[in-house]
Each structure stands twice: as structure tokens, then as C-alpha cells.
Image: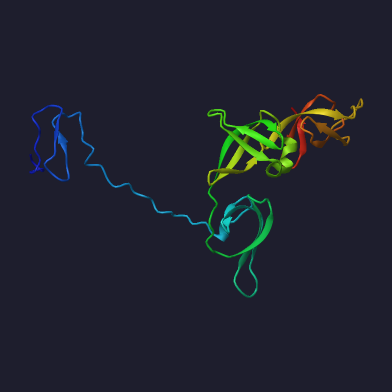
Amino acid sequence: MAGFPNLKLSLFPNSCSLSSSSYSLCSNPFIVSTSIFRRTPYRFPKIFAFSSNDIKVGSNVEVDGAPCKVIEFLHVKPGKGAAFVRTTLRNYITGNSVEKTFRAGSKIEEANIYKETKQFTYRDGAQYVFMDLITYEEYRLNEKEVGDKAKFLKEGMDCNLLFWNGKVIDFELPITVKLTVVDVDPGLKGDTAQGGSKPATLDTGAVVNVPLFINRGEEIMVDTRNGQYMSRA
């Protein structure tokens, strides 16, 4: 065959013949052998390396083999000596905060943390139970791991569970949640949003300041990051 002197075509319409170490052709024009395209899987090199210069609030790093979250950071460039980054880290495993200093530009190991959405289903004693609604697998966090976020946690709420090395280390609430006022001083006629605020107890036990016109039984939107009233639901 012109251009491929070492190739032979099979007389059988659906068969392929390989007489070259590099190419394979079929007599049936609709069948193409993929052996010509097979290669050893290529692993792309890691182009981006995480360093202390990339640190920001919320970054996840590994320090002494433990996953940590950056709470605060400050780039410092002294008059003499090398620049450095001063950080405050929260250890996901212990919950403790620690200060750590990194040399500017130094390589840092990123913590391989990923998120999956699970639903908070119920509380079992001191444990909070989350469920995967597809596999029905349960994940449990204790009171220490849930912490102050429990005051905004409500059954049936979808949350992000954080996994590291195959185990749950933390979770994230939705940024805004809809909760019901169960106890508050009654609003007075003529009260307006600009007329001040009053404490209200919500169905999760949280206490937030609400406008004077809010009454018992009303549903409101709350920002879980700061615990502030946002609006009526």
C-alpha cells in the first residue's frame, strides 16, 4: 500500500491486521483500531506550588502533619532581615489556635481538604448526626466539633462536611438560614426598622437582636457568620 509498505489489509470485512509495530488499519472503513493512539498515561506536572506568599484567611495548610485553617495573617517586611508571614492557625483536629511564622516565599504543604453536602438529620445524645441522602451513610460530630455553630443548626438543614484523610474534621453552615422567633417582647404600634432593636430567641436556641416590629412566630433570615438579623423570611 502506497506510503505504508509494511501494511497488509485483511480480506475479511470486519477484521484488522497488524503487520507494523506502529500502525493498524481495517478493511472496513467504519472500524478504526485505536492501537495507534494508545500511549502510557501522562501525568501533568504540578505547575502551581503553594507558598507562604499565597496565604490568605481561610487557606488550609498542613503543619506538623495536622490540617489547619488560617484565621489571621500578616506579611512583615522588616528593615533588616528576611521578610516573613505571621499567621494564626486553627487546628481542625484539636480545635486549638496557634501562631506560626513562615519565611516569605517558602513552600507550604496544602491540606487536602474537600467538601461534601450532607443533611443534618437529628441529635443523638452529645452527637450531631448528618446523612448522605443518596447512600444514607451517617456521619457524626460531637459537641466540641460542632461548637457555637449548634445555635444555628436545624434538623433538615443541608451543610458542607469537610473531609481530610477520609474522615470528617469540620462542617460549614449555610451563610443564611431561616429560623422562627419563639420568644420576644411584643412589637408596639408604630415601631419601625429604624426605631431600635430587641433580643429574640429563635427555635434553635440562638438569641439575636431583631427590629422592634418583629413578633413571636415570625420567620426571619439570619447571617450565620455574625449572628445578625437580615430580614423577614
Q: Position of residue 169 (x, y in %)?
A: 61, 45
Q: Is residue 102 above or below residue 211?
A: below
Q: Is residue 221 above or below residue 64?
A: above
Res 82 quadrant in image: bottom right
Q: Residue at x 49, y 57 (%)?
A: 49
- The x, y position of residue 156, in whole percent, is 66, 28
Whether residue 87 is visible, yes or no, is yes
Please state if 107 lies on the left or on the right of 150 as rendered. Answer: left
**Residue 213 in sight from this viewpoint:** no
State the count of labels. 0
**Quarter where residue 75 is shown:** bottom right
Residue 165, image x, y percentages: 53, 47
Q: Residue at x 72, y 43 (%)?
A: 147
In the orientation shown, which residue stands out farthest toward the front? 125
In this orientation, which residue lies closer to the viewer: 202 or 178?
A: 202
Indicate how the structure is coloured in the image: rainbow
Instruction: Compare residues 2 and 204 and report the one nearer the observer.
Output: 204
Going by the image, does 205 lie left or right of 67? right
- Image quadrant occupied by the N terminus: top left
Residue 36, quarter of the rendered image: top left
Q: Position of residue 22 (x, y in %)?
A: 17, 45
- Work out whether residue 171 or residue 126 is closer to the camera in this orientation and state it: 126
From the viewer's side, name the closer residue of 32 and 155.
155
The C terminus appears in which quarter of the rendering?
Answer: top right
| Residue 78 located left or right of residue 65 | right
